[in-house]
Image (spheres, rainbow, N blue to C red):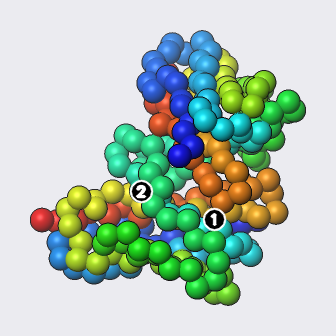
């Protein structure tokens, strides 16, 4: 059974600081997703990582994937208040109808 | 880009009644759609996979007689919560896609009173 572990689950940080969210998964997959969710809203797609060593960047967010270690990271550079949200990683369960399984999410609170 | 339209966005119903939630793919054909449920401050839990023209596949622990899924066309999947109870109050989100692409609906906030 595919399990997706995300940490930390809650993160409070100051503006301007850097931090990393980690996502580990238990079975082979080469599709990993990062999403952002604001309170009361649905999911906003941030990144899709499709191969080992993939790195994608958008603004202050950068995501990477190591399929051998079954690990993805979401790095936040010089955080700003607008990045406060919940961030989810999700992994494609490659052997089961392309369903994707979510981590528990990281609630990120950036203090001004 | 691919758009998935979900309706209603918010619904309040009385305990014991049924509620239908619709999910439409607007600019692509979706042979498969996924239904998730999210309780406050929790993650998205996959409930079922909806397959066009065939029976849905339910995840373990999800009552298929309570959560009826119909995927009658390549652009529409519906989730009906039957005989709703307060514990069914949740945020329901549908998703569709192909290959590595995934699109999520805007979600339905269900409150059962």
Q: Decide which of tag 1 and tag 2 comes sooner along the chain.
A: 2
Please determine whether, in this image, residue A19 is positioned above or below residue A108. below
Asked if marks 1 and 2 fall on the same chain, the answer is yes
User: Which residue matches tag 1?
Assistant: A91
Please determine whether, in this image, residue A17 is positioned above or below residue B62. below
Residue at horizontal 49 percent and vertical 35 percent from the top: B107
For the residues labelled 1 and 2, say whether their Cβ atoms are less than 8 Å apart: no
- Indicate which disc residue A77 carries: none
Residue at horizontal 66 percent and vertical 38 percent from the top: B28
The image position of residue B13, as x and y in percent, is 50, 15
In the image, farthest residue toward the left: A112
Q: Quadrant of residue A30?
A: bottom right
Q: Classify residue A26 as left or right of residue A34.
A: right
Residue at horizontal 45 percent and vertical 27 percent from the top: B9
Question: What element does badge 1 sit on?
Answer: strand
Please determine whether, in this image, residue A42 is positioned above or below residue A51. above
User: Which residue matches tag 2?
Assistant: A36
Chain letter for mark 2? A
Question: Is any part of residue B10 visible from this angle?
Answer: yes
Q: How many marks?
A: 2
Question: Is any part of residue B90 visible from this angle?
Answer: no
User: Is A60 or A38 nearer to us in this picture?
Assistant: A60
Residue at horizontal 71 percent and vertical 57 percent from the top: B99
User: Is B93 or A64 nearer to us in this picture?
Assistant: A64
């Amino acid at each position: 059974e595919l399990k997706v572990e995300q940490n930390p689950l809650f993160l409070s940080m100051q503006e301007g600081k850097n931090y990393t969210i980690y996502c580990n998964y238990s079975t082979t997959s080469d599709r990993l997703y990062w999403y952002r969710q604001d309170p009361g809203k649905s999911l906003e797609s941030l990144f899709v990582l499709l191969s080992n060593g993939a790195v994608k960047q958008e603004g202050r967010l950068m995501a990477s994937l190591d399929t051998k270690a079954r690990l993805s990271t979401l790095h936040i550079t010089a955080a700003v208040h607008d990045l406060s949200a919940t961030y989810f990683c999700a992994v494609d369960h490659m052997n089961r109808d392309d369903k994707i399984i979510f981590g528990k999410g990281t609630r990120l609170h950036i203090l001004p | 880009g691919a758009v998935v339209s979900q309706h209603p966005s918010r619904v309040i119903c009385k305990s014991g009644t049924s509620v239908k939630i619709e999910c439409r793919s607007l600019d692509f054909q979706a042979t498969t759609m996924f239904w998730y449920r999210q309780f406050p401050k929790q993650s998205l839990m996959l409930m079922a996979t909806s397959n066009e023209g065939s029976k849905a596949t339910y995840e373990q622990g999800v009552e298929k007689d309570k959560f009826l899924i119909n995927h009658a066309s390549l652009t529409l999947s519906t989730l009906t919560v039957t005989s709703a109870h307060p514990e069914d109050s949740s945020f329901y989100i549908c998703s569709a896609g192909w290959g590595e692409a995934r699109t999520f609906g805007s979600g339905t906030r269900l409150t059962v009173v």
